[in-house]
Amino acid sequence: MYLFSDIFKQFKRFFNIESVKDTRFLYDIAFGFMPRKFEPTEEDKMIYDEEEEVPEMYFIMEGIVGIGFSLIANGYSKDQFSIPKRQTGPCLICDHYVVNQQKSQFIYMAIIKDVKCYALTKTFLHE
């Protein structure tokens, strides 16, 4: 648990600790963190696409994540997608989809520089 105390502090709105029982929850969650890295190259930039199943939520430590939508449904366009929102780390993405078992409503991708983060899987979190 002490290994990930910096994550628990940075994302204190997600990890709301009020009692001893909550610290046990943090201890259990610490075993589920898995490191991830997304690069802004053509092969590795896509984190999630629209209407895709979301098996992991991400605690972004550094990097820039673009959040947008597909333009293909709106007719012919030279661009395949629009990225109107950019979030820089530290930030949390896809928590709603994992907790509520929903499909992605937007496109999430690494832009400009590498995105370094920790993931919690849906199966681990729901256990």
Image (cartoon, rainbow, N blue to C red):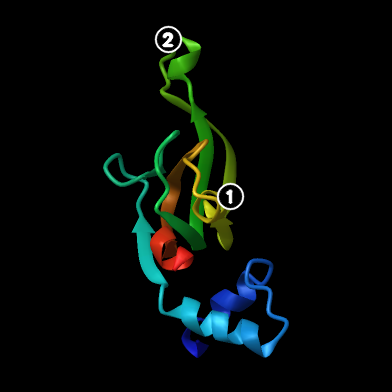
Q: Label 1: state its secondary structure.
A: strand
- Residue at the far right: name it: 18
Q: Label 2: state its secondary structure.
A: loop
Q: Position of residue 17 (x, y in %)?
A: 68, 79
31 vs 116, nearest the viewer:
31
Q: Position of residue 68 (x, y in %)?
A: 53, 34
**3 over 40 or under it: above or below:** below
Q: Which residue is at 69% across, 67% downward?
A: 13
Q: Position of residue 67 (x, y in %)?
A: 53, 40
Residue, disc 2: 76
Of pointers 1 and 2, the one earlier in the residue sequence:
2
126 vs 56, nearest the viewer:
126
Q: Position of residue 100 (x, y in %)?
A: 55, 51
Describe residue 11's horizontal placement relative to residue 44 as left or right: right
Residue, disc 1: 87
**17 over 113 or under it: above or below:** below
- The amino acid beneath tag 2 is Tyr
Q: Which residue is at 51% across, 30% downward?
A: 69
Q: Residues within 10 Å of mark 2 (few under 14, many from 20)?
A: few
89 vs 92, nearest the viewer:
92
- The amino acid beneath tag 1 is Gln
Q: Which mark is residue 62?
A: none
